[in-house]
Amino acid sequence: MNTVLNISAYKFINLADAAGLREIVYQQAAALELKGTVLLAEEGINLFLAGGAHAVRQFVAQLQADARFADLNPKESWSYTQPFKKLLVKVKREIIRMNHPAIQPAQGRAPAVSAATVRRWLEAGRDDQGRPVVTLDTRNAFEADEGTFAGAIDWRIDKFSDFPDAFRAHKAALQDKTVVSFCTGGIRCEKAAILMREEGLEHVYQLDGGILKYFEETDGKHFDGSCFVFDERRAVGPDLAVAPLR
């Protein structure tokens, strides 16, 4: 029986008190016997946690009591066992490293499209204005090897900080298309979409909530394989159940 609730969530928001928040967040999660990782930085919060359903949701409610996190909307999945070995709460320079400090999502998001909209666009091959649609995988190459959208652009990057240079090398090929950037849970494709917009690509969107939200809200059509996750489950399928690695 699946009894362990897994959540992932992030929010780009200015956290001048990230260092002070670390101890508060750690104590709250530890008291509820949660395991996983919470990253805090001046640009926001990024978390992957697991535990009993009541405890996980109590932790989320405690976070949401802070007005800055009131709209935090975690993605949920279930597992038979605890996929994390310990609890880590860290303060970092970025909650997702891009080495591009000019990108500040808290100043405004790139437009996001829902999972249902992306599925509809992929079914038609075009967006609502008739423009050709392509999906752009912003994850590392080994993640894409486990599964990705059919026909997705994959620049075979080794780490997310390689993305800006890869984009600049391929920018011209994207100019006449609607580009939907995607990643596991939304954080990397959000930063990527902002960078691409700032560097002049007009028709670029992020898949809101990433692959995990696509699995949650659609039947998973147009996605081949499974989604790599950074815990002991290793990969989940369109039904969000643990999937075998390729």
Image: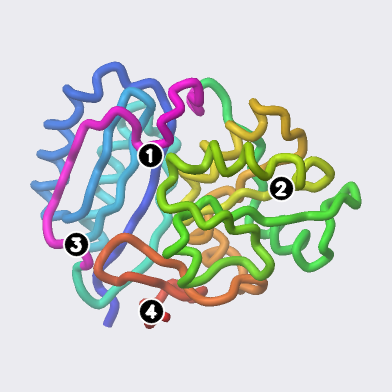
Q: Residues within 10 Å of mark 4 (few under 14, many from 20)?
A: some
**Residue on which the image places disc 1:** 96
Say which amino acid is labelled 1.
Ile
Say if the magenta span includes residue 89: yes
Which amino acid type corresponds to the residue marked 3 in the rendered image?
Phe
Picture quadrant where residue 28 is located? top left
Considering only order in the chain, which callout, 2 or 1, is on the residue closer to the N terminus? 1
**In the picture, which quadrant includes the N terminus?**
bottom left
Amino acid found under the numbered disc labelled 4: Leu
The dot on residue 84 is: 3
Cα distance, mark 1 to mark 2? 21 Å
Whole-number angstrom distance, CA of label 4 to CA of label 3: 18 Å
Q: For the residues marked 4 and 2, what is the alpha-carbon distance in whole angstroms?
A: 28 Å
Q: Which of the marked residues, 4 or 2, is nearer the chain's N terminus?
A: 2
Region in magenta: 83-106
Q: CA distance from mark 3 to mark 1?
A: 19 Å
Give percent across and percent down for residue 24. 15, 32
Q: Distance between the Cα atoms at labels 1 and 4?
A: 25 Å
Residue at (42% x, 55% y) in the render: 75
Image coordinates for residue 224, horizontal then vertical, percent? 58, 75
Q: Which residue bears the numbered disc 4?
A: 245
Q: Quadrant of the C terminus?
A: bottom left
Q: Nearer the viewer, mark 2 or mark 3?
A: 2
- Magenta span: helix, strand or loop, mainly? loop
SS for dot 1? loop
For the point 64% across and 58% down, the residue is 153
Residue under numbered circle 2: 179
> Does 219 appear above or below 65?
below
Callout 3: few (<14), some (14-19), or many (20+) C-alpha neighbours within 10 Å?
A: many
Farthest-out residue, top: 16
Sequence order check, earlier mark of 2 and 3: 3
